[in-house]
Image (cartoon, rainbow, N blue to C red):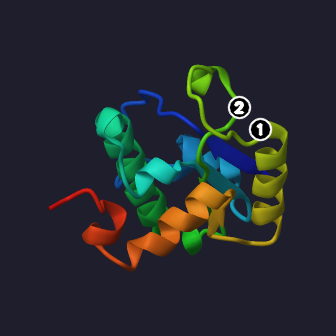
Amino acid sequence: MTVLVNNAGSPTGADLLTADLEKSAWGTANGRGAILTILSVLSWFRFPQSGAYSAAKAAERSLTNALRVQLADRGIRVAGLHVGYMDTDMVRAVDAPKSDPTDIARIAVDGVANGAYEIVADEASRQAQAALAGGVSVLYPQLP
């Protein structure tokens, strides 16, 4: 199976709805393949200092959902990987528990191989996903 890992955008100038999918990045999945979008626990909620990042990841989650439906009839499975802090340079200064990137990669590969549409890779992501059903007051208990 071919897997395209989408962790960042690229300026192709192609329109999402009218571009020739075979000539776009999505064509890389070759039909019967998969696209894995690296999302974040922050695609579901945000910290005060992460507004722009959270908004970008939420938009990417929405794009993942749209492509999942749009590409299904071409045999391309689109999965989203939700993960909190991974031990990478990006969060080097963050003093919080971090997942080993090797473990997350293994979870992601297993999820794609098992046909998952949504891969929730760590405890922070599981807690955030569960909190969604409770609404804004559960996600942001600090609100009056």
Q: Position of residue 77 (x, y in %)?
A: 65, 66
Assign the C terminus to one quadrant of the image: bottom left
- Label 2: few (<14), some or many (≥20) within 10 Å? some
Q: Position of residue 14 (x, y in %)?
A: 38, 38
Q: Which mark is residue 87?
A: 2
Residue 140 seen in the figure:
yes
Q: Amino acid at mark 2?
A: Asp
Assign the N terminus to one quadrant of the image: bottom right
**Position of residue 118 in the picture relative to residue 42 (left or right):** right
Q: Amino acid at mark 1?
A: Pro
- Label 1: few (<14), some or many (≥20) within 10 Å? few
Residue found at the very far left of the displayed protein: 144
Q: Which mark is residue 101?
A: 1
Q: Position of residue 64 (x, y in %)?
A: 48, 58
Q: Nearer the viewer, mark 1 or mark 2?
A: 2
Q: Residue at x 36, y 36 (%)?
A: 50
Q: From the viewer's perspective, is residue 98 above or below residue 45?
A: above
Q: Position of residue 70 (x, y in %)?
A: 46, 68
Q: Residue at x 27, y 69 (%)?
A: 137
Between 22 and 70, the residue placed more toward the observer is 70
Q: Hey, which quadrant is residue 5 in on the image?
A: top right
Q: From the viewer's perspective, is residue 141 above or below residue 4?
A: below
The secondary structure type at the circle numbered 1 is helix
Between 134 and 23, the residue placed more toward the observer is 134
Q: Residue at x 73, y 65 (%)?
A: 32
Q: CA distance from mark 1 to mark 2?
A: 6 Å
User: Going from the N terminus, do you reach mark 1 or mark 2 first?
Assistant: 2
Q: Are marks 1 and 2 in contact (CB under 8 Å)?
A: yes
**Position of residue 14 in the picture relative to residue 89 (left or right):** left
Residue found at the very far bottom of the displayed protein: 133
Q: Hey, which quadrant is residue 87 in on the image?
A: top right
